[in-house]
Image (cartoon, helix red, strand yellow):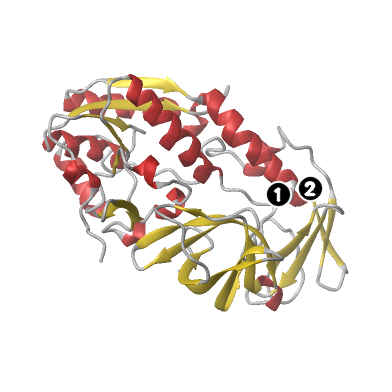
């Protein structure tokens, strides 16, 4: 049984902790909790995107909110611009994946490249002993090994987005909200008098913000009109670029007529064709076998085959599966039951009880 001791329980009071401050309630309460435990705390606001429409991501308001909280707590707030690093290591790859017909998750890459690499490196130069964020996750330890585990609030569990990390990256991190629910965090913020106690959490990709995704991506990928066909090849509609769609998508297809709603079942980038089917539970939307890229194991490699549970999207259910190694295909995941809308380019994250084992990018599936 893995110890439930979170990493911050092992840190001596008086240590200098730099907290990533987003302007939201989670990072604000994280800073307050660390102060209460006797740590020296500094806030850091990271700007990761340059845009003429600066407030589209609410960045200006977020910075103001972060500064207000730091002023109330009596701690300093530093700012750093990681826009170049974000562009080179996150956004460029995001566009290339879209062009290849996949559906990437830039937030996962941002965690690996920016929040858990650039941020701690910058913090170390500023004399920090540890760094912290407002993620809902827990760091547990057993026999000298560091594990990423689920937090108390399973509804807010963010280990899916952190599966690309390793034990070394987690060693100097603190997740102060590991033992709190979102409701408790909001109550704490309100009791402390934070103006952002009821601020709505961020959703979606930051650099898209409140803008229409299609309009935003058209800045970087030209429109390419193509056909939407059914499973028999009959044309049922048209689109402005197959890369704009994701497996299982219902909205935005613009297909009328009688019968059940239409869903995206497949994208053929070479011919710029989208295959759509009618019915939420159409067989072409389901698969029992997926081939994934080489997994990232957070704490240690697992001997394959291994039984686990897998999530194919952040808000998806954990599905029992077996992870195997194939000479022909590499890493193959077999599900006990068919899984809907397994999407190439997205991440499949593996769990064993409350421990996040790691995960991998989905390469392809077999309907």
Q: For mark 2, does the 10 Å Cα neighbourhood hold few (<14), some (14 to 19), or many (20 or more) residues?
A: some
Residue 293 at x, y percent in the picture: 62, 55
**In this view of the protein, which residue sits in the foreground, 164 or 191?**
164
Residue at 74% from the left image edge and 58% from the top image edge: 254
Distance from the alpha carbon under mark 2 to that under mark 1: 8 Å
Q: Is residue 5 above or below residue 174?
A: below
Residue 118 at x, y percent in the picture: 44, 29
Q: Is residue 50 visible?
A: no
Asked whether, in this view, residue 78 is left or right of residue 11, the answer is right
Residue 282 at x, y percent in the picture: 68, 77
Q: Which residue is mark 1?
A: 244
Residue 72 sits in quarter: top left
The local secondary structure at tag 2 comes to: loop
Residue at 45% from the left image edge and 52% from the top image edge: 163
Q: For mark 1, does the 10 Å Cα neighbourhood hold few (<14), some (14 to 19), or many (20 or more) residues?
A: many
Label 1 near label 2: C-beta < 8 Å? yes
Q: Which residue is mark 2?
A: 240
Q: Is residue 211 above or below residue 148?
A: above
């Amino acid at each position: 049984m893995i110890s439930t001791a979170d990493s911050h329980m092992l840190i001596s009071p008086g240590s200098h902790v730099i907290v990533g401050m987003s302007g939201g309630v989670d990072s604000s309460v994280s800073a307050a909790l660390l102060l209460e435990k006797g740590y020296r705390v500094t806030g850091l606001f990271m700007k990761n995107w340059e845009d003429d429409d600066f407030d589209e991501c609410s960045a200006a308001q977020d910075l103001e909110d972060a500064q207000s909280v730091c002023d109330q707590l009596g701690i300093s707030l530093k700012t750093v611009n990681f826009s170049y690093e974000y562009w080179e290591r996150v956004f460029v790859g995001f566009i290339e994946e879209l062009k290849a017909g996949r559906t990437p998750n830039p937030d996962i890459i941002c965690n690996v490249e920016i929040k858990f690499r650039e941020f701690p490196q910058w913090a170390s130069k500023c004399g920090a002993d540890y760094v912290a964020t407002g993620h809902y996750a827990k760091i547990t330890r057993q026999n000298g090994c560091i594990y990423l585990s689920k937090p108390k609030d399973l509804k807010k569990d963010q280990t899916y987005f952190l599966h690309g990390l390793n034990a070394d990256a987690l060693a100097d991190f603190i997740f102060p909200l590991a033992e709190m629910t979102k409701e408790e965090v909001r109550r704490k913020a309100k009791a402390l008098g934070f103006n952002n106690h009821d601020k709505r959490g961020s959703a979606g990709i930051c650099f898209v913000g409140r803008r229409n995704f299609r309009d935003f991506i058209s800045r970087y990928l030209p429109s390419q009109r193509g056909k939407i066909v059914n499973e028999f090849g009959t044309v049922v509609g048209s689109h402005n670029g197959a890369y704009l769609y994701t497996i299982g998508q219902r909205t935005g297809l613009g297909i009328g007529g009688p019968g059940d709603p239409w869903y995206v079942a497949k994208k053929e980038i070479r011919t710029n064709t989208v295959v759509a089917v009618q019915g939420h539970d159409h067989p072409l939307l389901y698969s029992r076998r997926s081939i994934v890229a080489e997994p990232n194991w957070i704490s240690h490699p697992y001997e394959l085959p291994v039984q686990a549970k897998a999530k194919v999207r952040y808000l998806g259910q954990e599905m029992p599966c077996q992870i195997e190694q194939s000479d022909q295909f590499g890493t193959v995941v077999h599900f006990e039951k068919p899984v809907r809308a397994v999407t190439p380019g997205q991440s499949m994250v593996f769990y064993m009880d409350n421990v996040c084992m790691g995960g991998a990018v989905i390469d392809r599936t077999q309907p």
